[in-house]
Amino acid sequence: MFLPASQSRYAYGLFSLMMLVLTTGVEPAFAHKVKVEGDVGATLHIEPNDTPRAGEPSQAWFALTRKGGKVIPLAECNCQLVVYAEPHVPGETPLLQPTLTAIAAERYQGIPGAVINFPRPGAYQLQLSGNPKAGQAFRPFTLKFNVTVAVGSNNKSNDNQPTQPAVNTEKNESNNFILPLFAIALSTVGVIAFFVSRRGKG
């Protein structure tokens, strides 16, 4: 039994995506990042489309849940977010310590969120750590998310490099060619003038 062309392409694309994940362990770029430690897990999402850009503020949020799927709002967690440029060594001072605020995103209410401004393109690690406030019953955690930051519109590699107009180069080259010709012409005129003046005297 054959599938219509559109369904066949969809099935093939889905199969290819599954094979990529299963054989390489690589998550597709558009998938939210999920980490779990103990009885706490979180899904990280960064606007826009999980593709932050250097030099541009990006809204990040963590759908923080405990085992069983119950949401942990920021009001119930002493949470802290730090950002490291990769690679980094344990004990190193974080590059950024964004302030967490309670936000609403998708179907989640009051979850931890922060605006992050990554200074340069490259690899970073976000570490979300927390422990329960009084009356809450989840274990302390530290969740680590690896993030790749793309080049932003304000820091493209060629923006800071002055470009030499092509007309200047051409002008310099033409000057280098014209000067010897001018010298030859001047010499020729001088020789002719010399002979003409001698002939006039003769």
Image (cartoon, grey):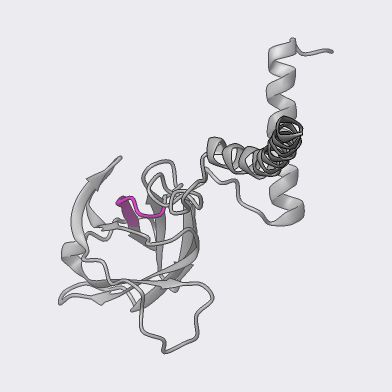
Q: Which x, y percent locates residue 148? A: 51, 57
Task: Judge from the rendering whether residue 103 lies leftward or rightward of residue 164; answer left or right.
Answer: left
| Quadrant assignment for the C terminus | top right
Q: Which x, y percent locates residue 145? A: 47, 65
Prevalent SS, magenta region? strand
**Compared to 175, does 122 lie above or below?**
below
Q: Which residues are magenta?
A: 54-63
Q: Which image quadrant for residue 95?
A: bottom left
Residue shown at the point (61%, 41%) measured from the top left = 175
Q: Which image quadrant for residue 64?
A: bottom left
- Of residue 199 and residue 174, the one placed in the foreground of this image is 199
Task: Judge from the rendering whether residue 82 lies leftward or rightward of residue 76; answer left or right.
Answer: right
User: Which residue is farthest front?
Assistant: 202
| Quadrant assignment for the N terminus | top right
Q: Which image quadrant for residue 144?
A: bottom left
**Compared to 177, does 137 lie above or below?**
below
**Compared to 199, does 129 lie above or below?**
below
Residue shown at the point (69%, 49%) measured from the top left = 21
User: Which residue is farthest bottom?
Assistant: 91
- Of residue 194 and residue 121, the one placed in the foreground of this image is 194
Residue shown at the point (35%, 54%) measured from the top left = 55
Q: Which x, y percent locates residue 110? A: 19, 53
